[in-house]
Structures are given as structure tokens and as C-alpha cells.
Amino acid sequence: MTKTTPASANARSGVGSGASSRTRIDSLYDLATGDEDARVCKDIPAASCKDQPRNFFAYLGANLLTKVADELCSAKLILPWLLGALGAPAVLIGLLVPIREAGVLLPQLAVAAYVRRMPLRAPVWIWGALLSAVTLALMALAAGTLDGAAAGWSIVALLVVFSLSRGLCSVSAKDVLGKTVSKARRGNLMGLSAGIAGAVTLALGLLLQFLGNAAQGVAVFVLLLGAAGLLFALSALVFRQIREQPGATEGGGNALDTALASIGLLRTDAAFRRFVLVRVALLSVALAPPFYVLLLQQGSDGALAGLGLLIIASGLASSLSAPVWGRLSDRSSRLVMVLAAAGSGGLGVLTWAMARWDGALLSSPAVFAVLFLLLNVAHAGVRLGRKVYLVDMATSDTRAAMVAVSNTVIGIAMLLGGLVGILADLYDAAFVILVLGLGSLVAAAYAARLKQVSG
């Protein structure tokens, strides 16, 4: 007579550890999505429905890790401070943000053609994350062993590779999201990841603020870059847990031919063309933060505590606003773009007026922290709203091409938009903030004319 063990009984009854794990994941998924329609599968393959809770949390975890890592190696905050500490030429500091953004966006039109050859696109994201990890490790090594121009040029060169690696992630991420997580769940997912990442970033800013002058050395930046590389490596392991169904491979031919055909979407798809024009106008929001930083630097001594203040404002903005933006974008991502752009525009006009009529107000750290926080709230809304809008607007067959085309156009526009810095030399930072604020108001008005695609 065969003795029945608890394990064998569980196996026959389907109540083993796997079933318990699935039950826990389902329960967490129900809690995260927060309504009675938690099993919605509106526009993903039927085979992906049963894996949606697992995929939701795998994507959430990987996205969270990369968001924190991006903050630890930010080209807007961390790398400029690092190059200054290393004594690198000032001209290299001016190249950081354009390289970081354009390096991600510009090559994607050609890369997307290769991605579409693959029935499974998640491996592209994983390779991009691993390459990012290696690049950041080398960047940390350069920061710890070199100084002056040698360190500056090495870090800028590695930043080019890092940006291209992040481009691999960018061009595949939205396609994987569109295949594994249903419409009306994506904004919530990205909002949760951004909110949690913002809280972690807030903790980092508080740490730097408390350390103050004790954290002036280059060693702290080496640690930040090393930690960012480790987080990218971990994100690759988490993303590997996503169960992706094979997708269409049409359009995966010659990269140049496919790229040219993809550009044709701007001519043949009016809705997509309007979205791209709105996204170009929304660059007014993305280009504003460095000029707010410039206003702060005019009244500070450049101590690391000042960097901590900016990180605190940025992290607090994300942790407070991203979950709200995410849920609202599942209802109307168009409305999110309108509200965020209008908020940024109004803030720009207000900041210019404060600088003109009572510049002493902007010398107050508390006042400036509030302004920078509100700006980052608006920026978070623009970023999340336009991402959700594009994923919801596209189909599984057009999503990769639309992402690549829009990102390539934005990469070119960003390089050209960087010329707005000339106005800072001719006038001042406050005038640039006014110009970008007015541009944001125009972007809000144009975004209101987009068709509704969410919900």
C-alpha cells in the first residue's frame, strides 16, 4: 500500500507551492488594479490573459529598477556634478543631456526593423539592460581612476554607448507591454513603478542632504554609478520572468527599407502625425528643468547638499504624482498631457514674473524647491501620458514602428531644441523659462485636439 504524503496530496489536488504562488500573485494583482474588472484582456493575445498578473509584476519590477538606476546616473543632475568634481572641461558638461536623450532616440528607427523580425521582443530589452549595466560599471571605473579631460571624455564616450543600450530597451519595452498587459492596466503599472522609484529617489536625496559636505568626494559618485549598473543587471533578471507570446514579424526586412516605410506612417496616418507634432511641442516641458537648475545655481555655492535638494524635489514629485497620473491616464491619457503641459506653462510664466519683479523670492531654497517640485510633477505627467497614449493608439502590428518613428523625430527635435540655450546667453535663464512656458501652453492647446484612445 502506497503511503500518501502531504506533498503528493497537494500535487494531486493542485494546491502545491506553484498554485499558492499563483494565488498570491492574483491577489496582489487584484489589489494593484483595484476594481472588479481585474481580469480585463482588451487588446492582448488570449494566451497572455492567464499570465497577465505575473507579467504585470515582472514588468513593474524591471521598470522600477531601471527608473531608480536612471536617477542614480542622471545626465541632468548626477553626471554634471561628477564631471565638475573630476575637473573635466565645461564643454563636456553641456553635451551630457543631448547625448543621453538623442542617443536613446535617434537610432531606433533602424533598430525597430530588426526588433520586428523577432517573434519575441523581450530578449532585446534584456540585452539592452545588460549592456547598460556593463557600461555603467566601466563609467564608475573611469570616474575612480581618471581625472580631468581624460575622465570627461571617457565618461562622455561611455554615455553614448549607455544611451544606445537604453534605446534597445525603449524600442522593445512598449511592444512587450502592449503584448502582455492589457489596455486600462498600463497606465496604472507605469504610475506605480514611477511612484515607488520616486520614493527611492527621495530617500537618496535626503541621504545626500544629510551627508552635506562629508559626501563631497568622487567616491560617492563611483558608488552611485556602480549601484546603477547593479540595478540594471537585476532588472534583466526580473524582465526575464515575463511570459511573452510570439507576435507578428512583418516588416522585419532590410533595416533602411523598413525605416523609410515606417517614416511613411507620418504621411498616411493622420492621428499618429498629430501625436508626433504634440510630442514635439511637449519638448518645451522636457527642456525646462536645466534652466530652473541654473536659477538655483546662481544663488548657491554648488555644494552637494544643493544636489540633494534637487533630487528630493524630483523624487517627491514622482512619488506623489505618478500613481495619480497613471490612473488618470487609463481614463484619458490625452487629458493627462493637457493638464501637465498647461501646468508647466503656467509655472514657467510665474517663475519668470517672480524673477523679474522680486528676484529675492527665488533665492529662498524653500520657494525654489516648491517650484522645482511642481515642474517635475508636470514633467512626470507629460512623460507618462504620452507613453500610454502611444501604446493605446497603436496596434500590435504598428506599435514598434510608431515608437521608433516618434522617438527618432523627437531625437532630432531635441538636438535642435537644445539651441534654446543660446537665449540664456543673450538674455538670461528666466527668459528661457518664459519662452518654454509659452511653448508648453501651446502644446497643451494642441494636445486637447487629439482623439481619445484610452479607457
Image (tube, rainbow, N blue to C red):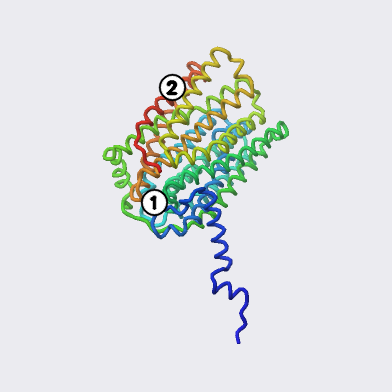
Residue 203 location (% of width, % of height):
65, 39
View extreme (bottom): residue: 1
Answer left or right for 383 relative to 360.
left
Residue 54 location (% of width, % of height):
51, 56
- For the point 54% across and 29% down, which residue is it? 374
Q: Is residue 421 above or below residue 113?
A: above
Q: Is residue 140 above or below residue 89?
A: below
The amino acid type, in three-letter code, at marker 1 is Lys
What residue sits right under mark 2 in the picture? Answer: 438
Q: Could you say which quadrant of the image residue 369 lies in?
A: top right
Identify the element where label 2 is drawn.
helix
The label on residue 342 is: none
Distance in Å between CA atoms under marks 1 and 2? 38 Å
View extreme (right): residue: 214
Residue 445 location (% of width, % of height):
38, 27
The label on residue 42 is: 1
- For the point 51% across and 42% down, which residue is it? 191
